[in-house]
Amino acid sequence: MWLSGAAKAATEALCGRPVALNQTLSLLDSGETLSIPIVSSAVFAEGKKSMAIAHCETAHGMDLLNGLEIWVLGEWSSQKCLGNQKNLPESWLEVVAGMGVGTIGEGGRISISSFALKLLHLNLRPLVPLDRSLRLEIVFPKGRELAARTSNHAFGVVNGLALIGTQAEVQVSASPEKLKISLAQLRKISNQNDFHGSLILVVGENGLDLATNLGLDQQPLLKVGNWLGPHLIEAAQQGVRQLLLFGYHGKLIKLAGGIFHTHHHLADGRLEILVSLAVNTGLPLEVIRSLSSAKSIEGALIWLEDNYPAMVLPLWKSLVEAIEIRSANYLSRHGSWPMRIGSAVFDRKRRLRWAGSIGIQHLSSLGTTLEDF
């Protein structure tokens, strides 16, 4: 939303219009509007280029993006405008990644969601003459620094932060408000007449996208944030009998260590958990020492795959089994329910790779096997 506000201000400046310090954005589908404050705007290069700056104000101090500075540089593009052809709605708008903005691989296209693009089209199309094309360069001055604290790189996004928002509302995965909304969604799903007792808890937006692409949406999918423990208890109380935890291995590994609120502000310990799993798996001491000295869990896994590929499968089988066992133990401490908890994890290349014994059974019920991937 703040990106779209800055983009609208930059476009107004480029068109020679007065720039409002509070940009009114139209929201997709709802017909509602939202006011976004702009820090500043300017025109330069003899009116051929413009710039606008906005700051994210998420109102959640725990949010990584709170206070993020956004620059949008605008200019008329040299590419030929294809007008309003229905099959080429983006032909008049080019959005490129500047400093601190993530791309899909080195030199790849900007990492931006269809929601973000649609929001830009909706709010900028009325400003841009039909015979012109607009080029926007997005810059996050601190994007590279902040991206190092995310899992963007695990999904092939490099050089900065990805623009993967899917809704206008800010959702903070660690906030109590997010938990309340998510638990209410779980209750709604379980109370549907066509609910048959099976549910998949998907961790994060990347997990939801991958699960859908894999056809796992034959069963209800619920995207959850960091409050995994309360979701396990609520699912059991709502009569869920078969539950599958589906997520990135770098996130779900915390459950194998007994950590059921996974936000990095509260607990990490992933490398220590990986080392413990390596010990239990019986990996050689020199391998365990190398894993323990890695700078990150991702670095440890890449090193293991490059140097001892035969050891990867036993280690990660140990991981997914540990997730299932620790999750069942967590649930038993809060009550007695017949719910069976399975796990399935994907890797940094967004490939479904490993599942525990219960997870394999759950996937099989959907006609999916690990060998398919």
Image (cartoon, rainbow, N blue to C red):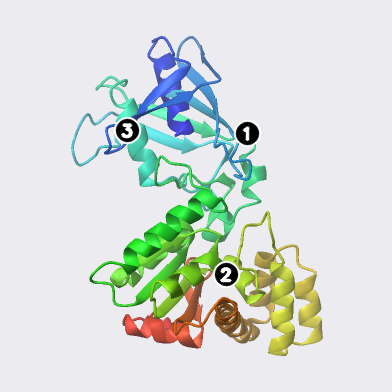
Q: Mark 2 is on which residue type? A: Leu
The residue labelled by disc 3 is: 121
Residue identifier under label 1: 141
Left or right: 293, with 133 as reference point: right
Q: Of all residues shown, which one is farthest toward the bottom? A: 282
Instruction: Determine the residue located farthest toward the left in the rendered image.
Output: 86
Horizontal side of 21 relative to 150 (left or right) equals left
Residue 352 vertical placement versus 18 (above, below): below
Pick the quarter of the image with the C terminus: bottom left
**Which residue sits at x=44%, y=27%?**
5
| Amino acid carrying mark 1 in the image | Pro
What percent of the width, then of the height, locates residue 125?
29, 26
- Give the vertical position of 76 relative to 258 (above or below): above
Of residues 136 and 194, the one drawn nearer to the viewer in this rendering: 194
Q: Is residue 279 visible?
A: yes
Q: Secondary structure at mark 1?
A: loop
Q: Residue at x 69, y 63 (%)?
A: 268
Gap between marks 3 and 1 measured at Cα: 24 Å
Nearer to the camera, 90 or 29: 29
The quarter of the displayed image where residue 283 is located: bottom right
